[in-house]
Image (cartoon, grey):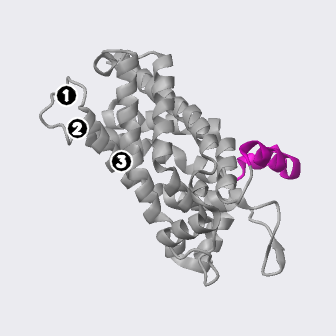
Amino acid sequence: MDFWPEFLTSSWGKEFVAGGFGGIAGLISGYPLDSIRIRQQNSKSGSAFNVFRHVVATEGPLSLYRGMAAPLASVTFQNAMVFQIYASLLRTFDRNIPASEPPSYKGVALGGTAAGAIQSLIISPVELVKIQLQLQSKKHQHNNQTTSLKGPIDVTRRIFRREGWIGIHRGLTVTVLRDAHSHGLYFWVYEYTKEQLHPGCRKNGQESFQTMLVAGGLAGAVSWISCYPLDVVKTRLQAQSQSKSAKYSGIVDCFRRSVREEGHGVLWRGVGTTVGRAFLVNGAIFTAYETALRFLCSNNDNDQ
């Protein structure tokens, strides 16, 4: 019974819990736009509005939340780990900077890069299941029989039954390539932007809600733009079944064939939807994270 009070008084515990709150806020606020993005990436045409209108008309508005159970079940842990790993590692690259001073931008970028690479191990299987659910219609044809994926557990079982552990980690390499550099840029842009908007806040921790929203939103938008072509490739690889009839044999093959068949524009299909979603989601993530962290730190000081 003493675990949670002791856990929340530690720096590790506060970062972990605050990161979890940020992840939940970001997922709920941006999931419908994420569903539209996935459908755009895996199709040959269709604006965001047309995709939205078609999905709502044929499958109902709740279909935009299809597959959310998988990331929602893991997003607290995943986002908590990202912020905790980042907070732990950024000082590793700043050994000569006293703890009373904010970390250098170099430390921020390197810490974010390491956190992004590590968290890919968690997020890759979750996104595989999510994409499989997001792309299915209410019913689809498989081996001449009408089947329907019932939920994340059903999808996971089917993948394990057909492909084993290799199948559940399909897309891991491209996920690491996508997340490592984009997370380094993500945290760097956030720290740099909030300091420009609110000078001195990196040291005193007194940035406003507006600063957190704008800096977080801009960080998300920039990081997604930097990795978007890799995300398109990842979506297409994870959307297919790993079998002899699979359309793409790997990252390079998927990139080449997609460009050859659909032009270079395919690598940026859905980017407008993604940037809009990224601004909304990451503004919510950083605001929820910073607010939760302030609350936990304030409660800890009052208890002491």
Q: Residue furthest left?
A: 96
User: Which residue: 28% across, 44% down?
Assistant: 110
Identify which amino acid the numbered label 1 is placed on.
Answer: Ala
212 drawn magenta: no
Q: Residue furthest right?
A: 57
Query: Where does the magenta region start and end?
Result: 47-66
Label 2 residue SS: loop
Dot 1 or dot 3, earlier in sequence: 1
Q: Is residue 224 above or below residue 246?
A: above
Dot 2 or dot 1, earlier in sequence: 2
Q: What residue is disc 2 on?
A: 91
User: Which residue: 46% across, 56% down?
Assistant: 122
Identify which amino acid the numbered label 3 is placed on.
Answer: Ala
Residue 115, numbered circle? 3
| Dominant SS in magenta | helix
Is residue 57 left or right of 71 when viewed as pictured? right
Identify which amino acid the numbered label 2 is placed on.
Answer: Arg
Q: What residue is disc 1 on?
A: 99
Q: Position of residue 44 (x, y in %)?
A: 70, 60
User: Which residue: 41% across, 46% down?
Assistant: 182
- Quadrant position of residue 120: bottom left
Dot 2 or dot 3, earlier in sequence: 2
Callout 2 crowding tier (Cα within 10 Å): few <14, some 14–19, many ≥20: many
Give the CA distance from mark 2 to mark 3: 13 Å
Is residue 195 left or right of 130 when viewed as pictured? left
Q: Nearer the viewer, mark 1 or mark 3?
A: 3
Q: Quadrant of the C terminus?
A: top left
